[in-house]
């Protein structure tokens, strides 16, 4: 990998990405920290104990910068900092990219250990709080959740299981396929996920379905795209502007009940097989933080059509992708008891997506549908060509025909009660300070 990444016109590199910059929060300077001063992701937290109202904070090492406290000390200023005194990121998301970048530059300067006005230790203690002493809450009030299907490898693999003679439908290379998900059941990492019950596909062709707990519970490794700004109903978002409506990215687990899905998905797509829970990570990694990790959009294989003009933009083609590595870890109750794990089930890359996040945004608004601050878009399962990069158990165990061998002699085709799924993600590039996404975890609990 070279140090010279393509630069997206809407994501410039500035002093906040300086690899030499270090923080007076010492834990942020550890080489394996997910949250160095170059990252500065946003989330919503509540201090444990006394003064526990939820508000927006910024992760730095193993601490959280309390933006509101820093504002009260006159160490930050402006509309974006003021918008952080809220129980969700939505007021902040309603602002413009220039506001977000302005706050990032102020915060980076404030946390810089070599900055011009390093706060006294007493002030440092007042404006930051140990993450371990906080509860991390759902960072945004999700207005609408739309889930895409942007990995051609995932679409082809799943299609070949459900429709062996016709795995990839003819629209796939023309439109970013998606469906409207459910916002009310988006939960933050750490929330338990109850096994859903529903109509399970008949065991035999022509048979009757049965109602009961899903027997084929799965996860889906995805990237969440957090929408900021938005468009007025009846207007579209040109692809060249679409990045401005992406505040940042997070990890997303689109839990899926495959036996319910197989029975219900035709003709209108997934419904109850997906709507029981979707978990996101607590920290939203800003598009600014990701600027050094941009890559060209997916290279379409020879013979694939060019996208139609409204999905085609030179800047997006040159730098619309993200060099983001993603992993799925699994911890079973037996592994936990033995003090082992978690076990790495797969490792994939967000570079394998056929469509860029900006194309998803532009496509979503191309009919005049209004996107709003706090909307959440799922990328679709991130799967690559190699078996070890398949981002769900359906693909990883090939519908249960190739069970996973876990440490301790256990096997898994699909998830069992008590299993914990942990998603992780990070960006690394030579000459840059690596940044992480934290984790997105959930334990499966027994059906109601
Ligand atoms: Ca999905």
Image (cartoon, grey):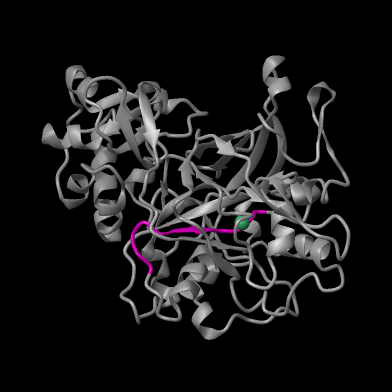
The picture quadrant where one finds residue 143 is bottom left
- Residue 113 percent location from the top left of the image: 28, 28
Extreme-bottom residue of the structure: 309
- Residue 85 percent location from the top left of the image: 20, 42
Q: Nearer the viewer, residue 375 or 33?
A: 375
Q: Main secondary structure of the magenta part?
A: loop
Q: Is residue 214 magenta?
A: no
Q: Quadrant of the C terminus?
A: top right
Q: Is residue 376 magenta?
A: yes
Residue 434 in view in this figure: no
Report ligand 1 position as a quadrant: bottom right
Picture residue at 51% right of the left edge, 68% below the top:
360
Residue 370 in view in this figure: yes
Question: In the rendered image of this protein, does residue 426 appear above or below residue 152?
Answer: above
Picture residue at 85% right of the left edge, 55% below the top:
203
Q: Nearer the viewer, residue 433 or 425?
A: 425
Please give the range of residues in magenta.
371-382
């Amino acid at each position: 990998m070279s140090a010279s990444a393509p630069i997206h016109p809407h994501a410039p590199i500035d002093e906040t990405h300086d690899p030499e910059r270090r923080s007076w929060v010492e834990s942020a300077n550890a080489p394996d920290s997910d949250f160095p001063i170059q990252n500065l992701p946003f989330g919503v937290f509540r201090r444990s104990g006394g003064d526990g109202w939820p508000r927006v904070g910024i992760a730095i090492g193993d601490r959280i910068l309390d933006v509101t406290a820093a504002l009260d000390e006159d160490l930050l200023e402006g509309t974006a900092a003021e918008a952080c005194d809220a129980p969700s990121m939505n007021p902040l998301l309603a602002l413009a990219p220039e506001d977000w970048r302005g706050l990032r530059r102020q915060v980076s300067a404030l946390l810089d250990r070599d900055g011009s006005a390093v706060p006294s230790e007493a002030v440092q203690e007042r404006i930051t709080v140990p993450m371990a002493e906080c509860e991390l809450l759902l960072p945004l009030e999700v207005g609408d959740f739309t889930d895409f299907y942007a990995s051609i490898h995932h679409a082809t693999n799943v299609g070949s299981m459900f429709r062996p003679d016709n795995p990839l439908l003819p629209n796939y290379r023309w439109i970013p396929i998606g469906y409207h998900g459910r916002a009310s059941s988006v939960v933050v990492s750490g929330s338990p996920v109850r096994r859903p019950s529903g109509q399970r596909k008949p065991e035999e062709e022509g048979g009757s379905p049965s109602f009961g707990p899903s027997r084929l519970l799965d996860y889906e490794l995805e990237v969440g795209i957090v929408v900021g700004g938005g468009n007025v109903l009846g207007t579209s978002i040109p692809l060249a502007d679409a990045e401005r409506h992406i505040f940042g990215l997070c990890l997303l687990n689109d839990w899926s009940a495959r036996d319910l899905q197989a029975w219900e998905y035709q003709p209108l797509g997934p419904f109850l097989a997906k709507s029981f829970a979707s978990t996101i990570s607590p920290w939203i990694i800003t598009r600014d933080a990701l600027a050094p990790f941009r890559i060209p959009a997916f290279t379409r294989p020879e013979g694939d059509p060019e996208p139609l003009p409204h999905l085609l933009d030179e800047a997006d083609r040159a730098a619309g992708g993200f060099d983001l590595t993603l992993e799925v870890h699994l911890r079973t109750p037996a592994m936990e008891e033995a003090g082992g794990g978690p076990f790495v089930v797969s490792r994939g890359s967000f570079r394998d997506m056929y469509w860029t996040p900006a194309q998803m945004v532009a496509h979503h608004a191309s009919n005049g549908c209004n996107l709003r601050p706090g909307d959440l878009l799922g990328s679709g399962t991130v799967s690559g060509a190699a078996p070890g990069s398949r981002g769900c158990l359906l693909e990883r165990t090939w519908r249960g025909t190739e069970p996973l061998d876990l440490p301790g002699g256990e096997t898994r085709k699909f998830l069992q009660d008590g299993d914990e799924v942990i998603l992780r993600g990070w960006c690394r590039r030579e000459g840059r300070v690596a940044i992480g996404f934290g984790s997105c975890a959930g334990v499966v609990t027994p059906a109601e």
